[in-house]
Amino acid sequence: MATRGGPARRPAVVISPILGSETAFVTSFAERFAREGWHALVVFRPEIAYDPARPFAQVEERIADGVMRRVEALDWLLAHDDVDAARVASFGISAGGIEGALVAGVDPRYVGHVLGLAGGPLADVLVDSDEDDIRRMTDRVVATLRVPREELRARLRGSIRTDPVDLAPRVDPAAVLLVLARRDRAVPARCGLALRDALGRPATIFLPLGHYASILFLPFVAPRVVEFLRRRFDGVPNEAPPGSAGTFARPPSRSRP
């Protein structure tokens, strides 16, 4: 993992894209982080899915597996000599923001987390979301189990243990910047507020928009995101020469999470 300007150790930001691992909305942030002299690692995830032939416990298994993939991605990143292990942060949008909230509760190696358009509990996000892929999946599960949606909600609440709201008390509120949409229906706005409360009401940027309009608006909040991450990286000796560029990288395909 080469960098311009020599082998100096540089901060890194681990990035989780939106549902389906669509990178269009995070690439500009990755490039912005690299211009700051930071490494930017985009971590892909499998598409959301439900297998009717498998037990219902697969929901929790898939969530926990996604978190473990992020842990392994950071392991891979920190194996490089030019990464400053003391200055690693995360950035995620939508499904990536939810994943970032989960990781924040289980992996203490991060000094900061930017969680965009995230929320919880996951049972409420999954049942109440109007996002097309999630809605189709929950409709399929309801049909497979032959239960009403409220029964599905109850089953999810009983099954999901890896939940951002439950893990939130483990996270330092000062280490979090939330970006929430007041009119969000994909990750319902009340779920965003529930996560905010569970996290101890960290610094929050409220956008007066819905979910998808807010995604398009996120580049306009980039300066505040960068400033937050700079503050989180402060206090650790900066070995990167001023003005040098970091890298925008992905793990090799054989070890890609």
Image (cartoon, grey):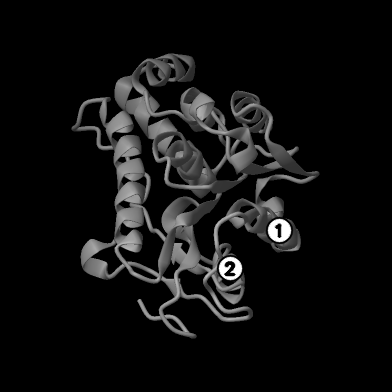
Secondary structure beneath disc 2? helix
**How far across and down, in percent of the image, does residue 33 sit?**
58, 68
For residue 73, above or below residue 3:
above
Q: Alpha-carbon neighbours of circle 2 within 10 Å: few (<14), some, or many (≥20)?
A: many
For residue 126, above or below residue 46:
above
Q: Which amino acid does label 2 sit on?
A: Phe
> Residue visible at 75% across and 37% down?
182
Q: Which amino acid does label 1 sit on?
A: Glu
Left or right of residue 169: residue 216: right
Quadrant position of residue 218: bottom right
**How far across and down, in percent of the image, does residue 18 sit?**
51, 53
Left or right of residue 4: residue 63: left
Kindly report the distance in space between the C-alpha atoms of the residues bearing marks 2 and 1: 11 Å
> Residue visible at 71% across and 39% down?
203
Q: What residue sits right under mark 2 in the picture?
A: 33
Q: What residue sits right under mark 1 in the picture?
A: 227
Left or right of residue 68: residue 137: right
